[in-house]
C-alpha cells in the first residue's frame, strides 16, 4: 500500500496500433490455335488482419489524497486499413475458343482490444473532480475489389467471367466465438425467432454468423418453410 499526497494526478493509457495492408493477385491466360483454344485464368487475394491489445489505466492498492483533480483515462485508437484486390484475364482465339476467368478477393479484419479504467483497493480523496473514463474509437476501413474478364474469338466462342469480393470486419467480437447457432443456412424452418443465430454454411459468407434482430418472428405468410440461403443478411434492420 502506498500513500500519495499530491496536487493533481493523471493516469493515462492509450493504444494507437495501426495496420496498413495491401494485398493483390493477378492472373492472365491466353490460348491461340487453328482448331481448339482453351484459356483459364484464376486470381485469388486473401488478407487477415488482427489487433488484440489490453489498454488499462488504473490505480491499485494506493491511498491517494489530492488537492486538485484526479484523472484516470484509457483510450483506444486502433486502426486497420486494408486494400485487397484480385484480377484475372483469359483470352482464347481459335476455330472453337473457350475463355474462362475467375477472380476472388476476401479480407477479414478483427479488432479485439479491451479498454479499462479503474481504481482497485486503497482509498482516494480529492478536493477537485475525480474523473475515470474509458473510450474505444477503433476503426476499420476495408476496400475489396475483384475483376474478371474473359475473351473468346472464333467461329464458336464461349467466354465466362466470374468475380466475387467479400469484406468481413469485426470489432469486439471474434468469428467462431458464437455458441451453438439455432439454424444453419441450409435449414428450412417454419420461423426464425428474434435472437436466433444463423450460421452460413455455403457461398461467399461461409463461416459467418448472423443474429436475427427483427421485431417480429421471420415467417412466410402462407406458413411455408423459409429458405435461409436467400435471406438478405446485409440488411442490418433484420440481421
Image: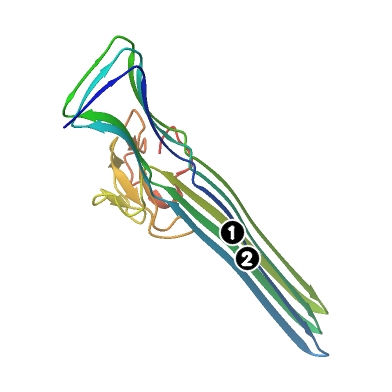
The quadrant in which residue 186 appears is bottom left
Front position in the image: 217 or 238: 238
Question: Which residue in the protein does label 2 denote?
Answer: 103
Whether residue 82 sits left or right of residue 196 in the image: it is right
User: On the rendered structure, is 139 left or right of 33?
Assistant: left
Q: First in sequence: mark 1 or mark 2?
A: 2
Q: Position of residue 107 (x, y in %)?
A: 52, 56
Check whether the beta carbons of the residues at disc 1 and disc 2 lie within 8 A of each other: yes
Q: Residue at x 29, y 47 (%)?
A: 189
Q: Position of residue 127 (x, y in %)?
A: 29, 9
Element marked by disc 1 = strand
Q: Residues within 10 Å of mark 2 (few under 14, many from 20)?
A: many
Image: 186 above or below 191: below
Disc 1 crowd, CA 10 A, few/some/many (<14, 14-19, 20+): some
Label 1: which residue? Answer: 164
User: For the point 71% across and 80% down, which residue is it?
Assistant: 39
Q: Quadrant of the C terminus?
A: top left
Amino acid at each position: 500500500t502506498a500513500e500519495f499526497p499530491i496536487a493533481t494526478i493523471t493516469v493515462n493509457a492509450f493504444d494507437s496500433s495501426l495496420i496498413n495492408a495491401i494485398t493483390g493477385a493477378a492472373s492472365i491466360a491466353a490460348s491461340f490455335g487453328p482448331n481448339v483454344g482453351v484459356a483459364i485464368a484464376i486470381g485469388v487475394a486473401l488478407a487477415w488482419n488482427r489487433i488484440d491489445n489490453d489498454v488499462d489505466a488504473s490505480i491499485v492498492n494506493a491511498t491517494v489524497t489530492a488537492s486538485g483533480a484526479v484523472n484516470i483515462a484509457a483510450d483506444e485508437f486502433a486502426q486497420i486499413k486494408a486494400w485487397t484486390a484480385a484480377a484475372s484475364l483469359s483470352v482464347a482465339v481459335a476455330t472453337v475458343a473457350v475463355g474462362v476467368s475467375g477472380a476472388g478477393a476476401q479480407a477479414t479484419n478483427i479488432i479485439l482490444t479491451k479498454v479499462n479504467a479503474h481504481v482497485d483497493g486503497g482509498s482516494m480523496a480529492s478536493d477537485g473532480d475525480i474523473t475515470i473514463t474509458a473510450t474505444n474509437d477503433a476503426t476499420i476501413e476495408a476496400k475489396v475489389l475483384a475483376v474478371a474478364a474473359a475473351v473468346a474469338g472464333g467461329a464458336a466462342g464461349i467466354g465466362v467471367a466470374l468475380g466475387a469480393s467479400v469484406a468481413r470486419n469485426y470489432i469486439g467480437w471474434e468469428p467462431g466465438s458464437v455458441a451453438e447457432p439455432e439454424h444453419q443456412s441450409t435449414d428450412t424452418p417454419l420461423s426464425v425467432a428474434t435472437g436466433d443465430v444463423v450460421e452460413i454454411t455455403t457461398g461467399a459468407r461461409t463461416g459467418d454468423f448472423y443474429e436475427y434482430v427483427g421485431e417480429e418472428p421471420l415467417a412466410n405468410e402462407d406458413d411455408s418453410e423459409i429458405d435461409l440461403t436467400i435471406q438478405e443478411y446485409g440488411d442490418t434492420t433484420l440481421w
